[in-house]
Amino acid sequence: MAVHPSVAAAPASLYVGDLHPDVSDSHLVDAFSEFKSLASVRVCKDSSTGKSLCYGYLNFVSPQDAIRAIELKNNSTLNGKAMRVMWSRRDPDARKSAIGNLFVKNLPESIDNAGLQDIFKKYGNILSSKVVTSEDGKSKGYGFVQFESEESSKVAIEKLNGYTVADKELYVGKFVKKSDRILPGPDARYTNLYMKNLDLDVSEATLQEKFSSFGKIVSLVIAKDNNGMSKGFGFVNYDNPDDAKKAMEAMNGSQLGSKILYVARAQKKAEREQILHHQFEEKQKEQILKYKGSNIYVKNIDDHVSDEELRDHFSACGTITSAKIMRDDKGISKGFGFVCFSTPEEANKAVNTFHGFMYHGKPLYVALAQRKEDRKAQLQLQYAQQLARLSGPSTAIIPSGYPPYYYAASGVISHVPPRAGLMYQHLALRPGWGANGFAPPARSFQQSPVPAVSNNTRQHRQNRGKLNGNSIAQGNTHSGTYLPQAQQISQPVISSRDSSTQQ
């Protein structure tokens, strides 16, 4: 076997997989004792239980010994189980890469790891080959082969796809991750069928008799519960895909006992979920297009209003196809709902008529219903526009994440450009600000870097002497009262002598 590029320099590390659960470090030392440059061995174990993870690592001083170990020990038996020996690939990206990786199925039961490698080794340097087996060690009929290069894998596909081994035609193709797999088309070949709507008294022998007329059956089973009673469905697996297709076409919709059979290609759970999800999305899109502009959103609904009352209230605007108030698990109203009209014109009429309308003592909010994604995008756009209007050149120091607010005489927060000489600071960011809303006595005063406040500014500050009914002391340098959310730092300039005295 050619030397792997990653072992050009000593030492060399090998991965040993498919180990028997009872294999320990000492067993590996004994198995590889003929290689004199073996430096260390380790069987990986679960950190919590201490049980073997059935794989380990070997470190060699000599790369030549590592190469010989792969050639002699790969697929050899240890404690009654064949182990895999290959180059250790510590890089997870390289391990998970699909480069040179092939998927092989329809393998005969007699083919094991060594047999699979013998079939493919003539086409290039193989990093790994594995036949997937069940718990009892029997082959599941498929496996994986990974070549060192993509070119070798392409040649193997070209030569071996459709190749017959022990009367079975191999399928060899590029390995595709589950997340990247495309749903099989109508022309896909399959051998496994799913059947349901079975009478509970139908036996496997009866099904075998019915379905064997279409070709050779590999396996047939009826799903049963813990008590051995039929669940009403089962699977039949044919040897030939053409036979499976004929059986599906003939038996689907046929009468068996008192029920009509449903027979279709067997699907994996992930594939079935993907199909159902796709169908749900398509149906949802059709509903959205059908009722686009006809569905309205209503909120601020009184808790005691029922679906019928909501329908009666909006029925004056047109024909209502559905009206529903959203409720929690306990049946309590969430305060909002939806009303769907037969035409967009009726929905617009309802919005114009009832938006702001007093209903059960509460003003209704009525608007055209939007999808969650559309509403989120619209809110993000509005938020970005507000930030754009607020942003602009300013000499004030503003803490990150807080817009420039100032308090008007009425106590309402206004979004206006900050005035020179004012620093706006959030309460939580102000040093020394206590939980009760008052600041402790200041230890020192620092001269403000901004110019002294003009008389006009001082007069304006006096006009803001009262905020929300609370009197705020003005003109006193030693006052301990602060404006909420806004700190005045533009006090009259203090001379150096007075500042030192106060310190």
Image: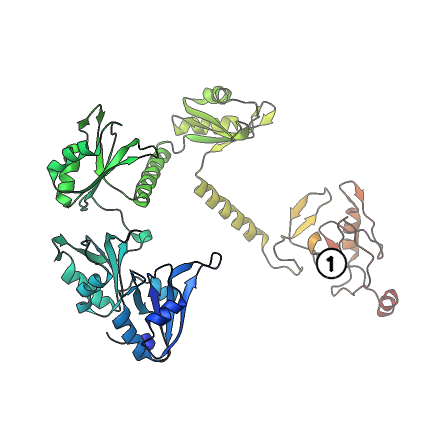
Amino acid bearing label 1: Pro
Rendered location of residue 95, percent (x, y): 34, 64
- Quadrant containing the C terminus is bottom right
User: Within the image, what quadrant is residue 273 found in?
Assistant: top left
Is 399 placed left or right of 68 in the picture? right
- Quadrant containing the N terminus is bottom left
> Foreground: 349 or 472?
472
SS assignment for the magenta stretch, majority: loop
Residue 89 visible, this orientation: no
* Residue occupying the point 13% across, 43% down: 242
Image vertical order of residue 106 relative to residue 87, above or below: above
* Residue occupying the point 61% across, 59% down: 393
Which residues, given as a range, are shown in magenta?
478-483
Q: Is residue 164 magenta?
A: no
> Foreground: 205 or 211?
205
Which residue is label 1 attached to?
Answer: 431
User: Within the image, what quadrant is residue 370 found in?
Assistant: top left
